[in-house]
Structures are given as structure tokens and as C-alpha cells.
Amino acid sequence: MNRLVGAISAFCSVCFVLAGLWLGSANSPAFAASEAPHTGMQSWTFSGVFGHFDRAQLQRGYKVYQEVCSNCHGMRLLSFRNLGEAGGPEFSEAEVKAIAAGFQVVDGPNRDGEMFERDGKPSDRFVSPFKNDNEARSANNSALPPDLSVIGKARGLHREVPWYLAPFNWLQEIAAGYQEGGADYMFALLTGYAEAPSDFKLAEGMEYNKVFPGHQIAMPPPLSDEAVEYTDGTPQTVTQYARDLSAFFMWAADTKLEQRKQLGFRVMIYLLILTVLLYLAKRKLWSRVKH
Amino acid sequence: MSHESTYKPNSNFEKWMDERLPIIRMSAEISSFPTPRNLNYLWTFGGILTFCLVVQIVTGIILAMHYTPHVDYAFDSVQHIKRNVNFGWLLQGIHMVGGSMFFLAVFVHMFRGLYYGSYKAPREILWILGVVLLLLMMATAFMGYVLPWGQMSFWAATVITNLFSAIPLIGESIVQWLWGGFSVDNPTLNRFYALHFLLPFMIFGVVVLHIWALHVTGNNNPIGIDVKGKQDTLAFHPLYTLKDGFALAVFAILFAWFVFYAPDYLGHPDNYIQANPLQTPPHIVPEWYFLPFYAILRAIPSKLLGVIAMVSSILVLFILPWLDTSRVRSAKFRPLYRIFFWIFVVTCLGLGYLGAKPPEGNYLIFARLFTAYYFIHFLIVIPMLGLIERPKPTPNSISESVLGKSKGGGGQPDAVPAAPENR
Ligand code: HEM
């Protein structure tokens, strides 16, 4: 009986990991969502056990953020050096320096006690567009554009399922290592602007958005086709911009994602071998006693 | 069933030590502790829990070296740990997931106790210490959740501390005393940090008592009858250490899966938004392991009665050993209790599910039904069952049930070496 339970749990853990590896491998059919509906799980290179970022995509995402979103949104937790670090957009050292130097950073006080401005260095934090929340509000019709450093993790998509399906839903999401809700939401939000239905009362200065809670958002549609120039031939469409931005924000919120998944794979293999060895040792030892 | 000491110091140094601090004797006794030969894998969860506690303490101490308990810096300092501290993302992930794993293990551990009647004489104190551990764990987890100072941290702290205001007359003053001010603020965060650092060590102390009590009464076992003699037991080491080790490895796989592939799955996205006292999130939900209790709290329309019900749902466990009128421990031989046990499991799972749903409509109706059954189970079903149930005949001894009648009681223990190197 005990032996059976032991064998079953060893077997189950192997199955669990294998199922996860399968479900979690980025482009498994279970999750390759179609393009058509923009709300729902998208297919991302960074999902699943072998998930990793697409450098070019992150670089494009940064470009769009920089040219469009950074007019209203800061990312105060990121430093320019992060843009060059492994597992991120991996801009070259020279590029990072150039990007940083493009910003004026307040430093000081100097020997006379005065604050002064200087060119940015890779170790500086991203520069926020507004000095404080009040300034941000007053420039945005009293709405506050949130800091986007961790937005990739601060939002999620909620799948409503009947109670009897809930456990299966959880198991499926856990086995797939589903952590991309933030990116899914961002993508849906940025592509979710639409004409308000005729019976919907939109307040002054507000926009209709299909996924924003309450459907009224104070952010004007930030993207339009051809607004940002891509030099690598990627289509310059709202959908593509939204996709690249979502990936960029996911990385920004989880800069160690690749390191985590790579180390995780090694730890999993190690634990599996350890488990099997312990099971065999245990079985050998227990075969000598009645229990 | 504390056993005679069989340890013989076999060197002059050991003898010398033994007369001064018999610590070698103690570890020898723990490793040869006579353990029922029929324990199943549900008995591995105590070891798993001990592992969880050590993991939380070790990762927690390192996190504390980098964390800043201040309303303006706490949120950013957690991000700093994840972004800039060497392997900070790993430590933070283990600590965060570890809390959930700890509760997962403790719930299994407790349902094991309920199923096999481990709370009954002579293990009442062992059980009560367990309930104390549960309460300490809950307090620790609650205060730990406040530290990252996200929206859920702040609002969970506000909702839960506000429960004390339901106490008539002095409630308001108690809440302000807990807060150290007129709302959850920097003083609250600081004291929660201090207590979150302290409580795990108190848990550690109570675990020592818990295991001490275990070594006085000995383990219960799946058939729930007392150990009658040597033929019923096996030395703890190496048989049970290996079995525990194997179970722990399986548990570690699940643990690692969450840490590496779904670290935020069990948390709430809102906690990645810095706390904002001026903006209430649309749904305030506690961590998953508090959901059954939260469901009970909200099932009752009066705040005071809700708080009383929620607290009682745990306090009732303290008197469980005296509520149960059945002398038979294991549900294996209790045909009726076995059915009600599973109904109770479904009740708890149902409450957990409903704790995450808004308290309205059908959700509220079911939350009330389950809450009512939760208490009926302890206060009516369990006392009654002992009186009306006809238990199945129990075997005469553990060895008889394992080895078969003919060999039972022969006093012929298997030739299992206590230490494999003596073979
Ligand atoms: C920090 C949390 C806890 C730790 C580290 C812990 C540790 C242990 C250990 C190592 C054992 C012996 C191995 C085993 O039977 O699994 C044990 C047994 C036991 N624990 Fe716990 N425990 C904890 C919480 C609890 C709680 C919350 C309860 C119940 C309310 C509880 C009730 C029991 C009982 C009744 C036994 C004896 C079981 C038997 O031999 O059948 N424990 N515990």
C-alpha cells in the first residue's frame, strides 16, 4: 500500500513536471491564442518553462515607450543600465550610454548648495515626466498616469469560469506557469479603444475602452498606425506597437524572468533525479520490513 | 509511550559528555525513536512543515537585511531586492511562495489529524499546541503580507485590524492602539515588521514543545490503536528519515515549480500597486489560505457576530478532543464519521471558494450554509456520532494488521538494523 503511494507520487511528480514542460513550452497549441479577439491569452515568447524575451521586440517596445508613453508615464524603478543587462533588450554599452546621455538629470547639491542638471549616465534612473503626482494630474485633466515600472505585474486578466471548472482552470494555469496576465491585459487595453456604444454615457474628456474597468479611461488613445518608425521592417501598426510594448513592460516588471526560468529548469531536473534516487533508496530499505 | 533509553556511551568523551549535557543521548534517542511501522505518507507532513519553517526563517533573515520598513520606501525596497540584490529575486520568491506552501502543508497535516483521530487522548496537548501553531502562523503570515506595502497589503491590514472595532465599548481604542495612530500608517508598518520578525521564533519554540509532546505520547497511526510492544514499531532512523526525505523531495518539486514558473500565481496583481490610503481597491481579498475564514466572517450580517464566528472557527479546534465522544481514533473503523469527514472537507473547500467571491446572491446563501455546517460538524455531528455509531472491529495490534494474525505478537521484530552501517 505504502509502496504504491510512493510509486504513484513519484510518478505523479514526474508527470506533473512533464505536463508543465509541455504546456509551458512557449508555443504549445493549448495557448496559441488567435489574433482575432484581443482580450484573452496571447502567445508570448516569454511564457512557459523555456520562455525568453525577443531582444528586438524589447528594443522596439522601449522605443515606443520612449517616444510616446514617457510623455505622461514614468518608470522610476528602472535604470538606464538595465537596458543593457542580460535578459533584457540588451542594447550595447555604447547605445545605453547614448540613451542615458539624451536625458537631463537633476543632481546635487553642488559645493554652493545648488541643484544642477547634467547629462544622464547608465547608473541613473529613468527620468519621470512630472515632478510629482500633482503636476501629473494637472497636466492630465486631473487623472493620474500611473508609473509603469511594475505595470506588467500589477494587472491581470480575469477568466470567469463556473465553479465546477475552477479547479481545472487553476491546475491548467499552474501547470502552464501562467504569469502573462499583465501582458495580456496591456495588449487588450492598448488595442481596446473603440467607439462607445450609443447607450453608454461617456463623461467629459473620457475615452471608451473595452477592457478598462468601467470602460471609461482618462488616457486618450496613445497609439496610432505609423506613429513610431520601425527600422527593421516590422509593421508599424497599433497591434504591433501594443504587442511590443506589452513585452517591454513585462520585462520591466520582471527583469530576472529569463534568469529565473533558466535556473528553474536546472533545479527541476536536479530535484527530479533526487526524488527518484530517494524513492529507490527508500524502497530498497523498506523492502526488508513488513509495513 | 516514552521509551526506555537504549543509548550506551561508547567512548570516554561520550561518557564525559553524557554526565554533563546528555545531548548525544538525546539525538540517539530521537533517531531510534520507536515509530509505528504502518505510518503512511500523511505522516510525512510534520517533517515537511519543519522544513517550511526553516526555509521561511533563513530566507526571511536575509530579506530583512535589505528591506526598509517605511511607508515611503517599503514598496521600492522589495523591488530593489528583486532587481538589484544578488539572487534577491530567488530569496523573495521562495519566501513569498513559501508562505503558501507552509499553509498547504499545515492544512494537510491537520486534516490528517482529524481523519485518524490524532487529537484524542493521550494527544490532546500535542493537538492544542498544533492549534497554537496555526494561530501563530496566521498572525505571522498576515503581518508579513503587509510589509511589501502594496494595495492589498494596506487594505487587508485596514480591514482586519478594523475587525477589533466590533468589540463593544473599547473596540475603537483597541484599533487605534494597534495602529499606533488613527489609521494604518508608518507606526503600524514598523510594529508589524518587528512582530513578523519575532513570531517565527516563537513558532520555533512551540514546534519544540509540539515535538516534545509527540515524543511523550508517540505517534498515532493509520489504524489508530496503541502501540503494544516492540513488534509494532520501527526505529525512526533510517527507515522513516528516508521516507520523509522522499516525501520532502516531492513537495520540493511543487514548491520549486511555483518559485520558478509561477511565483505570482498565488498572489494578487493589486499588490504590485503601491499602497494608497485614498483609493480602495474594488475587491479586497486576503491570501488564499485565509479565504475559508474570510467567508465565515462575511457570511454573518452582524460585524461583531461575524468576528466571533471567525475566531470561533479556530477556537473550536481547542476543545475538539473533548467534543469527540468516540473512543475509536481512526476513521478507518468509523463508517459514519468517515462520511462526515469528507462532507467537512467539502465544506472547507467550499468556504475557501466562496471567500474569494463577493458576498451576494447564491454565493452568500452557500457561504451561510457552509458556515452553519462547519459549526454543526464540530458541535453536533462529532459529539453525536460517538454515541450512535457502531465502529467496525479493530485489529488487536499494529503488527497483527501488518504482518497477519499468525505472526502477530510473536515478539519477532524484523531484522532491521537501526543503523545501516552495522549490517
Ligand atoms: C508550524 C507548524 C507545525 C509543525 C512544524 C508541526 C510539526 C509536527 C511534526 C514534526 C510532527 C510529527 C510528524 C507527523 O506526524 O507528521 C507533528 C505531529 C502532529 N501534529 Fe504538528 N506541526 C505543526 C502544526 C500543527 C497543527 C496546526 C496541528 C493541529 C491543529 C498539529 C497537530 C499535530 C498532531 C495531532 C500530531 C501527531 C500526529 C500523529 O502522530 O498522528 N500540528 N507535527
Image (spheres, coloured by chain):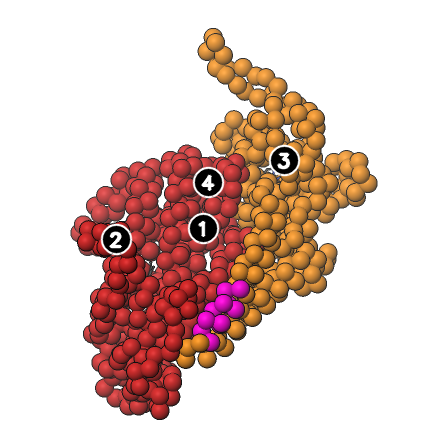
Chain colours: A orange, B red
Nearer-N-terminus badge (1/4): 4
Q: Are marks 2 and 4 in contact (CB under 8 Å)?
A: no
> For the magenta stretch, what is the residue range?
A277-287
Q: CA distance from mark 4 to mark 3?
A: 20 Å
Q: What mark, if any, has residue B140 been given in the picture?
A: none
Q: CA distance from mark 1 to mark 2?
A: 48 Å
Q: Residue at x 57, y 26 (%)?
A: A124
> What amino acid does circle 2 point to?
Asn
Q: CA distance from mark 3 to mark 1?
A: 25 Å
Q: Nearer the viewer, mark 1 or mark 2?
A: 2
Q: Nearer the viewer, mark 3 or mark 2?
A: 2
Q: CA distance from mark 3 to mark 2?
A: 60 Å
Q: What mark, if any, has residue B78 been given in the picture?
A: 4
Q: Are marks 3 and 2 on the same chain?
A: no
Q: Residue at x 68, y 28 (%)?
A: A93
Secondary structure at badge 2 equals helix
Q: Are marks 1 and 4 in contact (CB under 8 Å)?
A: no
Q: Are marks 4 and 3 in contact (CB under 8 Å)?
A: no
Q: Chain of mark 2?
A: B
**Displayed-image quarter of ligand 1:** bottom left
Query: Could you classify mark 2 by the number of other residues whose Cα lies within 10 Å: few (under 14), some (14-19), or many (20 or more)?
Result: few
Q: What mark, if any, has residue A85 been given in the picture?
A: 3
Nearer-N-terminus badge (1/2): 2
Secondary structure at badge 1 equals helix
* Above or below B197: residue A81: above
Q: Which corner quadrant of the image does residue B68 belong to?
A: top left
Q: Is residue A27 visible?
A: yes
Q: What mark, if any, has residue B12 been given in the picture?
A: 2
Instruction: Look at the image and tell me in which quarter the C terminus of chain A lies.
Output: bottom left
